Amino acid sequence: MRPTHIEHIGIAVKSLVEAIPVYERLLGTPCYRIEEVPDQEVRTAFFKVGTTKIELLETIAAQGPIGKYIEKRGEGIHHLALAVPEVSDALRDLEAAGVALIDQEPRQGADALAIAFVHPRSTHGVLLELCQSSRPEEE
Ligand code: ZN
């Protein structure tokens, strides 16, 4: 697997309504996209920071992954996303190396990305997301 860059950093927040203006102030840039990902039971908000992004995640279901995360650990950094040329190739490489995967196959994520998650038990505690941009013209 050869990541090309850090695609984004995901931050779990209790409320997008509260967090968006805070991050707009902190980053000096407006939120450019809000998107619901029913599959992951989240509503996401994106900010561009140079060539990478910050993704705020709010749960849309108390028992969704972000809802459970905040209940257990509070708000904060939730995952680190690496951009890779092909998510499916990266998954095959990691599987062959014995890395624990959450997703065996890529799925559709927010911001038009094919994504897959790697289990934190194989990464010293970091939930890693692999991302493949399907809109490279916008990079
Ligand atoms: Zn993400």
Image (cartoon, rainbow, N blue to C red):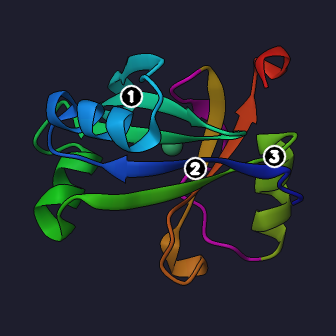
| Residue designated by label 2 | 103
At x 66%, y 37%, the residue is 106
Camera-side residue of 127 and 103: 127
Q: Nearer the viewer, residue 76 or 100?
A: 76
Q: Is residue 48 left or right of residue 59?
A: right
Residue visible at 66% across and 31% down in the picture: 114
Q: Amino acid at mark 3?
A: Val
* Real-space CA distance between mark 2 and mark 3, rounded to the nearest whole angstrom: 15 Å
* Within-10-Å neighbours for mark 1: few <14, some 14–19, many 20+: many
Residue 96 in the image: state x and y as whole percent: 83, 69
Q: Check disc 1 and report the residue beneath it.
A: 45
Q: Nearer the viewer, residue 136 or 67?
A: 136
Q: Please say if 94 is above or below 138.
A: below
Residue at 82% x, 53% y is: 90
Q: Which residues are magenta?
A: 98-111
- The residue that label 3 is drawn on is 84
Ligand 1 within 8 angstroms of badge 3 C-beta: no
Q: What amino acid does circle 2 point to? A: Asp
21 with respect to 80 (left or right): left
Quadrant in the rendering for residue 131: top right
Q: Which amino acid lies under the numbered mark 1 shown in the image of this protein?
A: Ala
Q: Are marks 1 and 2 in contact (CB under 8 Å)?
A: no
- SS state under label 1: strand
Query: Seen from this angle, which residue lies furthest bottom?
Result: 124
The first of marks 3 and 1 along the sequence is 1
Drawn side of residue 50 relative to residue 31, left or right: right
Whether pointer 2 and pointer 3 mark residues with C-beta atoms closer than 8 Å, the reply is: no
Q: Residues within 10 Å of mark 3 (few under 14, many from 20)?
A: many
Q: Is residue 104 magenta?
A: yes
Which quadrant would the N terminus be assigned to in this image? bottom right
